[in-house]
Image: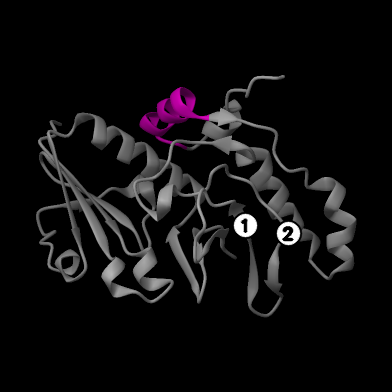
Amino acid sequence: MTSPASPPPHSLQGLSRRAQLFVRGHGLRVPPREIQPRRVQWLRHGIAAAEIDRVADFQERWGGLALPPAPAYEGGPRTLNADAPQGSPAEGWWFSAGDERVSMAYGFMIGPGGEFGIHAERWTPLHASTDGWVESLALAHHAARWAKNLTKITGDAVDALDLDEYEPVPEVQGLTDNWWRGTDSLIAVYRGEADCPTAPRCREAHIYGGLDG
């Protein structure tokens, strides 16, 4: 039996040093789904060649990459793996970002503009790219390791957070979700489950305190 391989170097391009170390140290590459054998069938179903190329590019960089679970969304995809595009030329195209770890009311998708998000009752982009999702995982791993305390809040208390003294962490490319950096703390705000299945009570924030520079 062949052991899982390390992530390929090209999957690290464009990531921060923290995220690169995270992927190298904690990521495993398992055999990804093959896209090219499906190309002809997808073309026959009216999927544009450019959209198939987008899926193939995702697989080349991320396909088969298994990372530690996220602290929200029941851990995120088990492995990053694309599948057939869904949608239409009029509304745009989405494709799967990978299978869920547990039974979920939504799936993880890559949006028309390359956004990483979740799709159920509606499309909810979490980060502007898969890079942003990976950066968020790396930051959560870093914060959980070094924080002296962790506070979790939910619902309306999330909207009451005072973030005036914080600045957004740009590398996570936050859209619905985001990370905020203070002098000695980090705050992760997860709104995707509140927006996608329309469940406001699912808003959640994790406050990591006692961090140094």
Sequence-wise, the earlier of marks 2 and 1 is 2
Residue under pointer 1: 96
Question: What x and y, as percent, mark residue 70?
Answer: 39, 45
Q: Are marks 2 and 1 in contact (CB under 8 Å)?
A: yes
Residue furthest to the front in view is 103
- Amino acid residing under circle 2: Ala
Q: Is residue 17 magenta?
A: yes
Q: Residue at x 83, y 46 (%)?
A: 36
- Amino acid residing under circle 1: Ser
Is the residue 109 above or below the residue 17 in the image? Answer: below
Determine which quarter of the picture holds residue 80.
Answer: top right
Q: Is residue 13 magenta?
A: no
Query: What kind of element bears circle 2?
Result: loop
Left or right relative to 27: residue 51: right
Considering the whole magenta stretch, tell me its main secondary structure.
helix
Residue under pointer 2: 84
Question: Where residue 148 is drawn, which disc sits there?
Answer: none
Q: Which residues are magenta?
A: 15-27
